[in-house]
Amino acid sequence: MMKQPALNVYKAFGLRLASEIALPEALREPDQAGGPDVRIEWEDLKALWDERKQESDYYAVHGDEFMMHIPGTAIFRVQGGKRIGVSPDEGAEETGIRLYVLGSCMGAILLQRKLFPLHGSAVVIDGKAYAIVGDSGAGKSTLAAALGKLGYPLLTDDVIAVSAAEDGSPVVIPAYPQQKLWQESLDMLGMQDGEYAPLYMTKYAVPLSTGFYGSPVPLAGIFELKKTELEGTDMRLLDGLERLPAIRYHTYRHFLVSLFGLDQWHFGVSVSIVNHVRMYQLARPALGVTVHDLVTRILSETGQNVKILHG
């Protein structure tokens, strides 16, 4: 891989990214002249990683630096919320490198800059943001894509950046106009996989030429998507004792919170979020197609005229 002669400047999570790596997933920043918030650069990190890594660990924290190694892809270094260094493994593809730069590395950047990251997707319904959080494989992106097909635009996929308005209420900052969907989800939603670039296995990058909302939106609700042994779907309002642990659990790369010494900050922001938004648990069976029922439940709860997704 060769360094590019000039930096590409992008906008994501409200930040200006100046990158030696082309990031086609992100939106270009029209003003290329201003200074960046975050720089993304190639560098040789092999010796430093050998010095800092610990047995069987894929990450290391040293002061304000976070490092991780994804074998076959790259060693990454995130510094002080301002810089991402990338040292590619031999034969690594840039598609895989970008996956981690825009995911785990940006998640670490957000924490270092004290922008609260949740793990999930967020859509805009009636001028308000609703986050869909859950474990990997729960169906967060699929549910957001189904809502998108009904005209409810996407704010972010995978990493949800939450900041505070002047009155302390939470606001979701848009990321990039792309979703990551499995083949099964593409088939269910009537989307052709041949049109999209594969990320890994049968998961694809789905760019959004339309249906992306590019401005910050107040956060009004959080839906926790959870697989259960139920035969159908169910939804319930989370009570006070359940909400804070749920926020902690669904923080993106939550293990970094303590490693970065951010427990007190994280708790304070979590309290502010649960005091301003309603939180629900959306239960779905582990097997079977239930996205139509889940969409109906979300739209009913958010006061929309319920539409049924076909195809």
Image: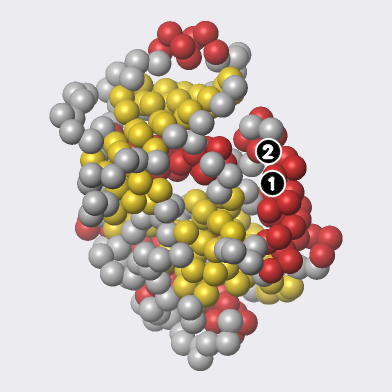
Q: Residue at x 56, y 26 (%)?
A: 64
Quarter of the image containing the C terminus? bottom left
Q: Which quarter of the rendering shows the N terminus?
A: top left
In the shown orientation, is residue 176 left or right of residue 241? left
Check disc 2 and report the residue beneath it. Answer: 262
Disc 1 target residue: 266
The one nearer the camera, 138 or 209, is 209
Q: Which residue occupies the extreme right position in the image? A: 241
Q: Residue at x 57, y 77 (%)?
A: 298
Give residue 207's position: percent from left, percent from top: 29, 58
The image shows residue 251 at horizontal and vertical percentages of: 62, 48
The relative height of residue 38 versus residue 296 in the rendered view (above or below) is above
What type is the residue that disc 1 sits on? His
Horizontal placement of 116 versus 35: left or right? right
Of residue 272 and residue 156, the one placed in the foreground of this image is 272
Left-right relation of 216 to 303? left
Q: How is the image coloured?
A: secondary structure
Q: Residues within 10 Å of mark 1 (few under 14, many from 20)?
A: many
Element type at marker 2? loop
Q: Which residue is drawn at the image coordinates 46% and 85% (left, top)?
A: 308
- Give the distance between the C-alpha atoms of the residues marked 2 and 1, in whole angstroms: 6 Å
